[in-house]
Amino acid sequence: MAKQVRTVYGSALFSAARDSGRLTEVREQAETILLALNENPDFLRLLNHPEIEMKEKADMVDAVFAGNADPLITGAISALLEKGHGRELANVLERFTDLALEEEKIGVAKVCSAVELSDDQKERIRKKLLDTTDYTSMRIRYEVDPKLIGGLIIQLGDRVVDSSLSSKLAKMRRDLEAGC
C-alpha cells in the first residue's frame, strides 16, 4: 500500500508540475522540504498524530508552507493528510523528485571507493558518467569504504557497476569452491 501511495501521489505531483511548466521550481521546493523533514522528524509525527483534528493539521500546513511552497506541494500535502497517508509524505516527495530529475536529465549517482578520491578522479568519473548516459548534468555522492580494498562501486539509478577488489576476490573464492 505504501508503495502505491508513493507512486500515485508522486506521479500526480510530477504530472501537475510538468504540465504547469513549474517542474524545476516545484522540485527544488520539494527537495528543501525533504531536507527540513529529515532535520525535523517531530513535525511529521505531529502531522500524523491521531488525536490532532484534520482542521488543526491543515492549519499547521498553511502556517508552515503557505507563501513558502508552491500550491501544488501544499495541495499534495493536504490531500495526503486528508486521506490518512501523511506518513508517506517524504516518500511521495522523493518519488516526485526522482521523476523530476529524470525528466530534467539530471542523473543521481553514488560512488563508493576504498580511499578518498582526488578532485581530478571525481571529475573523470563525472565526465565518464555524462559521456555514457543521456544526462546533461550529474549529482554524485561519494563515499569511502575501506572494505572494498580497491576499485569502485558506482550506482546510477537501478544500475550498479562493481569493480571493487573485494567483490573480485569473493567471486574468485566462489569459483574455486565450486570447482572443488
Image: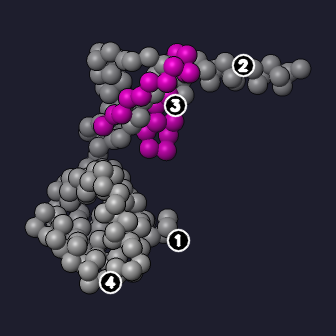
Q: Amino acid at mark 3?
A: Val
Closest to the camera, between mark 1 and mark 3, is: 1
Residue 28 at x, y percent in the picture:
21, 53
Of callouts 4 and 2, the N-terminal one:
4
Instruction: Give the CA distance from mark 3 to mark 2.
Output: 17 Å
* Quadrant of the rendering where the C terminus is positioned: top right
Q: Which mark is residue 1?
A: 1
Q: Nearer the viewer, residue 61 or 118?
A: 61
Instruction: Classify residue 100 as left or right of residue 150.
Output: left
Identify the residue at horizontal 49%, vertical 24% (top origin): 145
Of callouts 3 and 4, the N-terminal one:
4
Q: Residues within 10 Å of mark 2 (few under 14, many from 20)?
A: few
Of callouts 1 and 4, the N-terminal one:
1
Q: Amino acid at mark 1?
A: Met
Residue 147 at x, y percent in the picture:
56, 21
Instruction: Classify residue 49 as left or right of residue 31.
Output: right
Q: Secondary structure at mark 2?
A: helix
Colour mode of the rendering: one colour
Residue highlighted by disc 3: 161
Identify the residue at horizontal 22%, vertical 73% (top origin): 60
Q: Amino acid at mark 2?
A: Met
Instruction: Give the CA distance from mark 1 to mark 4.
Output: 24 Å
